[in-house]
Image (tube, rainbow, N blue to C red):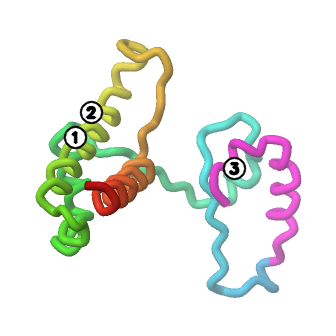
Amino acid sequence: LQNCHLAVSWMPRMEAIVDGFDPNSLHPDFRLWLTAMPSPQFPVAVLQNAVKMTLEPPKGLKANMMGSFQNFSDEFFESCQKPDVFKKLVFSLCWFHAVMQERRKFGPLGWNISYDFSNSDRDICLGQLQIFLDKYE
């Protein structure tokens, strides 16, 4: 389940469902993955019985850029009909992503509204960029 913090009214129902799990009747490989931002409405019992994981963005522009480019292969760049232009635009988009991630540590300085430009947002932008380059001259 993703973005559980957005369904605050459903949290008590989710807690009842999780409390109703019988470990003896569940498949041994069963895992319930939940994603959520910190929220005071998130059921404490669910958190207490869970293994918690966090995903922190890399520290610094260089680490962020290295992390982005580790996910790309030569095939990824060559999959676009205009690979030279695509490579330059991918670099620019990844640089923008890294700056947005790094800017968060400064808080409200320079930003009116904070927005988390996440890795999934970056990936969607990369896909849209490739479609745009392949479709238009």
Name the front one of labels 3 and 2: 2
User: Looking at numbered disc 1 in the image, what kind of residue is underneath it?
Assistant: Trp
Q: Earlier in the sequence, mark 3 or mark 2?
A: 3
Which quarter of the rendering shows the N terminus?
bottom right
Which element carries disc 3, helix, strand or loop? helix
> Which mark is drawn over residue 95?
1
User: Looking at numbered disc 3 in the image, what kind of residue is underneath it?
Assistant: Cys
Which element carries disc 1, helix, strand or loop? helix
User: Looking at numbered disc 2 in the image, what kind of residue is underneath it?
Assistant: Val
Residue at 66% over, 86% down: 28
Start-end of magenta stretch = 1-22
Residue at 82% over, 55% down: 15
Residue on which the image places disc 3: 4
> Which mark is drawn over residue 99?
2
Which element carries disc 2, helix, strand or loop? helix
> Which mark is drawn over residue 124?
none
Where does the image place residue 83, in percent across and percent down from the top left? 16, 63
Q: CA distance from mark 3 to mark 1?
A: 30 Å
Q: Are marks 1 and 2 in contact (CB under 8 Å)?
A: yes
Viewed as shown, does residue 3 lie left or right of 126? right
Q: CA distance from mark 3 to mark 2?
A: 28 Å
In the rendered structure, does residue 41 fall within the stretch colored magenta? Answer: no
Say if 51 sits above or below 90 in the image.
below
Say if 117 sits above or below 110 in the image.
below
Q: Residues within 10 Å of mark 2 (few under 14, many from 20)?
A: some
